[in-house]
Amino acid sequence: MEKVTSLQVAERAGVSQSAVSRVFTPGASASAKTVEKVRKAADELGYRPNMMARAMITGKSRIIGLVVAYLDNQFYPLAMERLSNALQEQGYHILVFTADNSRGNVEEVMKELLDYQVDGIITASVGMTNDLTDRCAAAGIPVVMFNRGQDGDHVSSVTSANLAGGRDVAEFLLSCGHKQIAHISGWQGSSTGRDRQQGFCDGLAEAGVTPQIIDGMYDRDTAAAATRQLMGGDNPPDAIFVGNDHMAFAVMDTLRGELGLRVPEDVAVVGYDDVPLAAWAAYDLTTMRQPVNRMVDAAVNTLLTRINDPATPARRIEIESPLIQRGSTKGPIA
């Protein structure tokens, strides 16, 4: 059976072939009457536009690549869903890839995306080398890093204000009267992990407090082992700031289920992200809320701006986060 062409749709609808093209081109203008006639004719004939052929003509695939390091952390499925919805509303199709930072397959995934001739790429918690960003730039494909930053000013990034967030946690725990404070940090190979730790340490240093620090690698099992190490040491902490909620849940499970300790009476716990599970009664986790909706809006706007105007300079956007106080911590001392 031969494929139905746009010319056949135009003849059935009584419009020009260019009108059919406008109806099926996101963002193109067509009257409501024309849209109704063309779509009715297309449905009757079983017509679907050839997106690959259009991409060859226009040089635009209308495809955005979304690359995520891992999906275990609840923050990323939520962010990816909202990024996908926001881009689809703008008429883009989405390709989702996973790239494991620890396995070093980021370069392989990015090469594959370039082969698909995507119009742009958003990476979520994925580390980018300068070589990769240069390669994307040479191909004319803008990249926006989501919840991860990179040194230099040649790639756009959108994060929460991680340095300020870490400092806010330090000030909050000090205000609650804690003295023996520990930090199970995010992976120190990531800008988010480093910045949250730096802000936290800077805030504590102003009060003359030096925290015990263990890199939790953004991994549940590693965070649980770090909890055992901290609580089994000579100076067990009375408060632990954990680099994200995903690890914080493992810390709380270990404290309560394995070590028989009470949260917050024996040990206070603070996370970072405010994923939906943080508000569940089983955890009731005090945490820094990453403003995911605002971060998604900023990432999409930044990417589309650079697609439409490649001369637009890269932007580094940081969005402030609020501290959400729940039952895993005691309130500040009056």
Image (cartoon, rainbow, N blue to C red):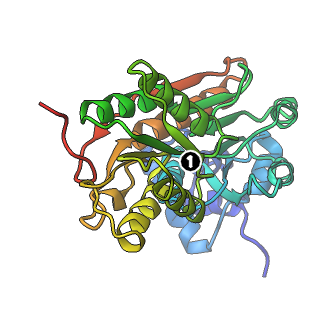
Q: Where, by quadrant of the figure, is residue 31 drawn?
A: top left
Q: Does residue 134 sit above or below 226 in this rendering?
A: above
Quarter of the image for the N terminus: give it: bottom right
Residue lying at 58% horizontally and 37% vertically, measured from the top left = 192
Q: Position of residue 308 (x, y in %)?
A: 65, 28
Q: How many marks?
A: 1
- Vertical order, 112 against 18 (above or below): below
Residue 52 seen anywhere in this rendered image of the structure: yes
Q: Which residue is mark 1?
A: 91
**What residue occupies the far bottom of the structure in this picture?**
1
Occupied quadrant, residue 151: top right
- The residue depicted at 81 percent of the width and 31 percent of the height is 140
Left or right of 255? Residue 192 is right
**Residue in the image at 47% along x and 59% along y:** 74
Residue 28 at x, y percent in the picture: 56, 39
Q: Position of residue 184 (x, y in %)?
A: 52, 47
Furthest-front residue in this view: 234
Disc 1 secondary structure class: loop
Residue situated in front as seen by the camera: 196 or 209: 209
Viewer can see residue 89: no
Mark 1, other Cα within 10 Å: few <14 / some 14–19 / many ≥20 = some
The residue lying toward the viewer, choosing from 250 and 57, is: 250
Q: How far from the left and from the top, in percent, is residue 189?
A: 70, 41
Which quadrant would the C terminus be assigned to in this image? top left
Q: Amino acid at mark 1?
A: Gly
Q: Is residue 290 left or right of residue 197?
A: left
Q: Nearer the viewer, residue 4 or 68?
A: 68
Camera-nearest residue between 258 and 42 = 258
Seen in the image, is 92 located left or right of residue 252? right
249 over 202 or under it: above or below: below
Residue 168 horizontal side relative to residue 40, left or right? left
